[in-house]
């Protein structure tokens, strides 16, 4: 396990990478390499990146059965989430998260730019009194199915085709964001939204931030399609970071996909040799 010590020098370096500076500020010899390892893949601009983040208890819960999700993460877990927000172009949540938690999705615990806020709202349930629509912050885009009647609203609506299961395709969402120059994306919640992106194999990295509390019951942060055998389980490369009050598991699904592809190639070669 690697311990992360965030300094102002390191954070400003990461923000400079996020802005696409070709020559970011030089780092002194004492700067923590673990913090650079955890956040640099998000900050560096190049190919598109989709990051998902889950803050949960030791027993995998993100809230109580009544929906109380306050203080699941410790103060360092919250700072970690806000760093992720500050380093991406856009943050995605489902409308259920907006209805339940009324988040602002802004950067408050750290310095940095607020991301564009994206709400996946298939059926037009976005509350007109939602905090994010009235705080004067970053733009809000709402993704709706193209069969939902348009309303006179305070946000920009992006209309996408409804899928057979009633929802919106994660790939359609990412393509619509890319058309608007939003290519580094944080999928923040809730569980249904994150799970749809993971099931679609569109998550490049997953950060699971674990706080030292046990809730005992309540919703889980990720609910994927069921599998019959553990051999079917996802097995990303994982690095573990102690960020203070919480532990972050940095799961690299890109490397997992590359390993699966390489294994398939080796199997094809073996079958060809046996033919």
Image (spheres, rainbow, N blue to C red):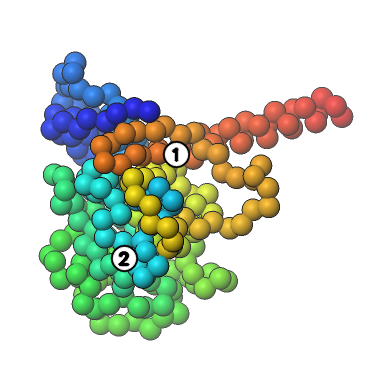
Q: Residues within 10 Å of mark 1 (few under 14, many from 20)?
A: many
113 sits to left or right of 262: left
Work out whether mark 2 precedes mark 1 in sequence or the reverse, and give the earlier one.
Answer: 2
Q: Position of residue 263 (x, y in %)?
A: 66, 32
Q: Position of residue 229 (x, y in %)?
A: 68, 48
Determine the secondary structure under disc 1: strand
Viewer-nearest residue: 214 or 176: 214
263 relative to 248 in the view: left or right: right
Label 2: how many residues lie within 10 Å, few (<14), some (14-19) or many (20+)? few
Query: Can see residue 237?
Result: yes
In the rendered view, tell whether residue 208 sits above or below residue 101. Answer: above
Compute the Cα span from label 2 to label 1: 27 Å
Quarter of the image for the N terminus: give it: top left
Q: Where in the figure is residue 59, as x and y percent of width and height? A: 44, 51
Q: Which mark is residue 18?
A: none
Q: Residue furthest right?
A: 275
Location of residue 207 (image quadrant): top left
Q: Residue at x 25, y 37 (%)?
A: 244
Does residue 194 appear in the picture of this structure?
A: no
Image location (x, y in percent) of residue 16: 19, 34
Give the image quarter of residue 160. Answer: bottom left
Q: Residue furthest top?
A: 29
The residue depicted at 33 percent of the width and 46 percent of the height is: 211
Q: Which residue is mark 1?
A: 251
From the image, tell me which residue sits under label 2: 68
Indicate the secondary structure of the residue bearing disc 2. loop
Q: Quadrant of residue 48?
A: top left
Front one among 104 and 63: 63
């Amino acid at each position: 396990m690697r311990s992360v010590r965030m300094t102002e020098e390191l954070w400003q370096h990461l923000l400079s990478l996020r802005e696409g500076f070709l020559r970011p500020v030089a780092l002194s010899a004492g700067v923590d390499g673990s913090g650079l390892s955890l956040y640099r893949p998000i900050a560096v601009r190049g190919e598109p990146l989709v990051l998902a983040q889950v803050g949960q208890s030791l027993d995998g819960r993100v809230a109580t059965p009544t929906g109380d999700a306050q203080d699941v993460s410790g103060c360092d877990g919250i700072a970690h989430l806000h760093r992720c927000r500050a380093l991406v172009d856009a943050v995605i949540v489902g409308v259920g998260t907006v209805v339940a938690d009324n988040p602002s999705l802004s950067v408050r615990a750290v310095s940095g730019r607020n991301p564009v806020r994206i709400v996946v709202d298939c059926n037009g349930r976005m509350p007109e009194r939602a905090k994010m629509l009235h705080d004067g912050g970053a733009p809000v885009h709402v993704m709706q199915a193209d069969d939902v009647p348009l309303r006179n609203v305070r946000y920009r609506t992006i209309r996408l085709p409804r899928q057979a299961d009633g929802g919106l395709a994660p790939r359609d969402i990412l393509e619509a964001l890319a058309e608007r120059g939003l290519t580094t994306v944080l999928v923040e919640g809730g569980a249904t939204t994150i799970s749809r992106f993971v099931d679609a194999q569109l998550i490049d990295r997953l950060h699971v931030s674990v706080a030292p509390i046990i809730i005992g019951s309540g919703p889980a942060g990720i609910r994927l399609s069921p599998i019959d055998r553990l051999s079917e389980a996802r097995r990303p490369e994982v690095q573990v970071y102690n960020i203070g009050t919480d532990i972050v598991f940095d799961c690299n699904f890109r490397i997992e996909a590359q390993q699966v592809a390489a294994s398939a190639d080796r199997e094809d070669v073996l079958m060809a040799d046996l033919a």
